[in-house]
Amino acid sequence: MEGRGWPLVWTGHLKPMEPRWETPVRYRLSLGEESVELNTLLGDEIQIRFEGEKACRHCGRRIRKTYNQGYCYPCFRDLAENDLCIVKPHQCHFHEGTCRDESFGNAHCMQPHLVYLALSSGVKVGITRKTNAYNRWMNQGAVKAVPIAEVPTRKESGELELHLSQYLSDRTDWRRMLKNEIEERDLLQVREEILPHIPERFHPFLLEGEEVCRFRYPLLSTPEKIKTINLDKQEEVRGRLLGIKAQYLILDIGVFNVRKFTGYRVQIARMAG
């Protein structure tokens, strides 16, 4: 409801933000049946209040504790998307016949994957399904990214990523990313520097002539210090929205990792001026 003296209010269970590649990146937040166009709240004072209820992002049942960013324990234990090979793709065991869900494996793992370089704090190497590349880069807060190889399966992309992690980081320093402390590097030059380290078996999959993708985020300012907002310790927070980057809302009182609290039922209010 919106009117004189009233805030605008959205209520529901949190889901990860959905970015769209625009200039700047445009973010939408889904809360069950409702959604919020977050860029329109930039500069406004907002309130986030945890209503004490959590629900599994997959099966929807109410739970006391979430696992792996929003799942109940049975879904965490049984779903293919929560298997260890998701975070360690080189350990994919699809061809061993032990995949938790063969249809998931065919749809997500037995598909072309990109091995890429991205710059969010320092240069990192990563992998993503070809169809999900832009979302992956925006969810990591990358300001630049470029694919360097396209391999047939997730397992093979993970093997190349693991090999290249000897020379480049495979992680994002999220604190430096949010503070905009970015080591400026030419990704095409980095690509040339690591080519001699790529095993010959991956040479047929190398890409040439790929353009560097660039991203700009909706930011009024960046925090000098990082203070995290934890809904398990502080059920209600109120502050001015200064920016949105990766899966974080940057407020003048701290940063809120939306993905971490997937499944939490919250009320978000835009406070009346």
Image (spheres, rainbow, N blue to C red):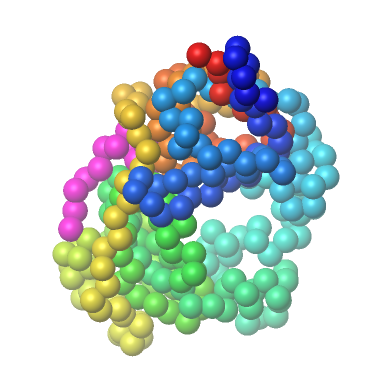
For the N terminus, which image quadrant?
A: top right
Tell me if residue 67 comes above or below residue 158 in the rendering.
above
Count of numbered labels shown in the rendering? 0
Front residue of 26 and 57: 26
The residue sitting at the right extreme is: 61
Q: Which residue is drawn at 38% across and 69% down?
A: 115
The residue sitting at the front extreme is: 4
Quadrant housing residue 260: top right
| Image side of residue 140 versus residue 48, left or right | left
Tell me if residue 70 comes above or below residue 207 in the rendering.
above
Residue 180 is situated, as x and y percent measured from the top left of the image, at: 29, 37
Observer able to see residue 123 = yes
Residue 159 is situated, as x and y percent measured from the top left of the image, at: 44, 72
Q: Give the range drawn in magenta.
A: 174-186
Q: Which residue is drawn at 78% across and 34% down?
A: 64
Front residue of 131 and 4: 4
- What secondary structure prevails in the magenta region? loop
Q: Which residue is drawn at 35% across and 45% down?
A: 24
Observer able to see residue 232 = no
Tell me if residue 182 comes above or below residue 51 in the rendering.
below
**Is residue 91 on the magenta stretch?**
no
Front residue of 24 and 80: 24
**Is residue 185 on the magenta stretch?**
yes
Residue 10 is situated, as x and y percent measured from the top left of the image, at: 66, 31
Q: Residue at x 47, y 57 (%)?
A: 135
Residue 147 is situated, as x and y percent measured from the top left of the image, at: 33, 69
